Image (cartoon, grey):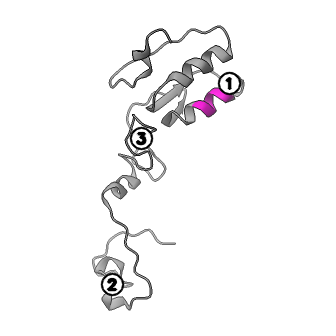
Amino acid sequence: MKNPQLTTEVFGPTTLLVSYEDKEDLLKVAREMEGQLTASFFGHKEMLSSHENLLDLMETRAGRLLFNQFPTGVEVCESIVHGGPYPATTDSRSTSVGTGAILRFARPVCYQGFPDEFLPEELREENPGGIKRKEG
């Protein structure tokens, strides 16, 4: 890429339009990209299937891949990840949205074999606080 500044992530409404001669030329540009929060692919299924190498490569560059969609708004659900490889995030094992976001602030502790009365209330069988728990 002639201008290396175009490989860095930009926040706000931005479009990078890349013209290329062949698939290898496109892959070369994609390899130069730094980590991104999102990457959108626009086209039809046949185009996507003929560019599988690009999809595989961008999977290593972005935390959220979209097909024929814009990354506006993020649904808060179990499966959403909003992060990506450095420099998009400093730790790509976590996310800033979705139900997994709380794990960034948690310190896991395992209580094994303890009688119920010695466990924190949130972990007791009767669940005295009535908190929602994911079981199973």
Q: Under tag 2, what secondary structure? A: loop
Residue 54 in the magenta stretch? The answer is yes
- Decide whether the magenta segment is chiefly helix, strand or loop: helix
The stretch of residues the image draws in magenta is 53-57
Residue underneath mark 1 = 51
Residue type, mark 1 in image: His
Q: Which of pointers 1 and 2 lies earlier in the amino acid sequence?
A: 1
**Label drawn at residue 119:** 2
Q: Nearer the viewer, residue 127 or 101?
A: 101
Q: Which of pointers 2 and 3 lies earlier in the amino acid sequence?
A: 3
Residue 107 placed where, x, y %? 33, 65
Residue type, mark 2 in image: Leu
Residue 84 placed where, x, y %? 45, 39
C-alpha separation, residue under disc 1 versus residue under disc 2: 53 Å
Look at the picture and state if 83 lies above or below 136. above
At a point 38% along the width and 39% down the height, the residue shown is 89
Q: Under tag 1, what secondary structure? A: loop
Using a 10 Å C-alpha cutoff, classify the residue at mark 2 as few (fewer than 14 neighbours), some (14 to 19) or many (20 or more): some
The total of numbered circles placed on residues is 3
In this rendering, position of residue 88 left or right of residue 130? right
Residue underneath mark 3 = 83
